[in-house]
Image: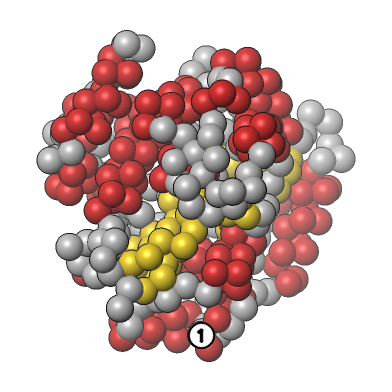
Amino acid sequence: MKQTAVVICPGRGTYNREELGYWGRYHADKKAFIAAIDHYRQGLGQPSIEALDGSASYSLNRHGVGENASALIYACALGDFADIDRDRYDIVAVTGNSMGWYLALAAAQALDAETAIKVVNSMGSMMQEGVIGGQLVYPVVDEAWRPVPAMREQLLQQVAAVNQLADCEAYLSIDLGGLMVIGANQSALNELKSRLPPVDGRYPLMLAKHAAFHTPLLASVSSRAKSMLSSKLFTRPALPLIDGRGHIWQPFATDIHALYDYTLGHQVVAPYNFSSVIEVAIKEFAPDKLILLGPGSTLGAPIGQALIKHNWLGLSNKPLFKQRQSDDPFLLAMGQEEQRSRVVN
């Protein structure tokens, strides 16, 4: 008997040193798919996915820049999506985090293959003349992944205080389970990093090669994207799509122009609420499994933290989530070999 699944597409920051060679390991047989991507990139004078993925070593300055990172993640994630065993899983909805929204559009066929790489590559390349601002990550959960309202309030208070300073702009960028991502200009990032109490010797964490995504600082990017990309590139999705507000776009009730406006408008300049995405996924679709596409599995923790927030399946803390993942995983991350084997043929 088939199990139902909501598929989650990853965003930026998921193709790192450990993922080098991911395409070659799992998708070397998908010649036509990769040829179309590489043909498009060749026309722009960009390195092919096969060349990037097959590099002898990982370089942040090569693999981590927008147009290369976005295309690598797109190729690997959509390759994984094609490998899901449809005899075992009935995909009831598709969603993603941040850049993963563009991937979700492709997986749900709201963008065809030729259009999807154009959108993904264009949005990834949009700031090639200079990254606008940056992102800082800070936790709002305890060691057991339980929400700590005081930590969230403290962070938001510091953001508000920094915004009172000259030449400082900071905004909530992504609500990421137990993490809050702040998008800001450099002055505000420096202030926040100096003001926020250190946590676990890791936070506040500055994300390399990331712009102030999902904030008003990217208004110019939104305008440029709309001037470059037409609404005619979009079509109604074949599967339900959950966007960054938690809104569901149904196959037979989607206004294509509204989907276009959201994707290149609101989604670019307003916060992306991944926590709400997971809440809608579990409460509206009640899937047997969540399937996280590769490369990597860094979204595993934020997804687990979102499940704990709602006590889903009785998961009230990190140890219980880890135990469930060991015994009978609810979340299947295709970037992890053992869990991947439960998803593919």
Q: Is residue 13 left or right of residue 236?
A: left
Q: Position of residue 265 (x, y in %)?
A: 68, 32
Residue 148 picture quarter: bottom right
Q: Position of residue 267 (x, y in %)?
A: 65, 39
Instruction: Assess disc 1: are there few (<14), some (14-19) or many (≥20) residues with their C-alpha within 10 Å of its C-alpha.
Output: few
User: Quick one: SS at disc 1?
Assistant: helix
**Which sits in the foreground, 244 or 14?**
244
Residue 115 picture quarter: top left
Q: Position of residue 289 (x, y in %)?
A: 41, 72
Q: Residue at x 20, y 30 (%)?
A: 32
Q: Is residue 34 left or right of residue 222?
A: left
Determine if residue 191 is in view.
no
Query: Does 331 sit above or below residue 20?
Result: below
Q: Residue at x 27, y 45 (%)?
A: 79
Image mark count: 1
Q: What's the residue type where badge 1 is placed?
A: Leu
Work out which quarter of the rendered image holds the N terminus and state it.
bottom left
Query: Does 233 sit above or below residue 293?
Result: above
Query: Does 341 sit above or below residue 29?
Result: below
Q: Position of residue 345 (x, y in %)?
A: 17, 62
Q: Is residue 271 left or right of residue 236?
A: right
Q: Residue at x 33, y 44 (%)?
A: 78
Query: Does 68 sit above or below residue 181?
Result: above
Extreme residue in the front direction = 252
Extreme residue in the right direction = 164
Determine if residue 235 is in view.
yes
Q: Residue at x 36, y 74 (%)?
A: 3
Color scheme of the displayed model: secondary structure
* Residue at mark 1: 313
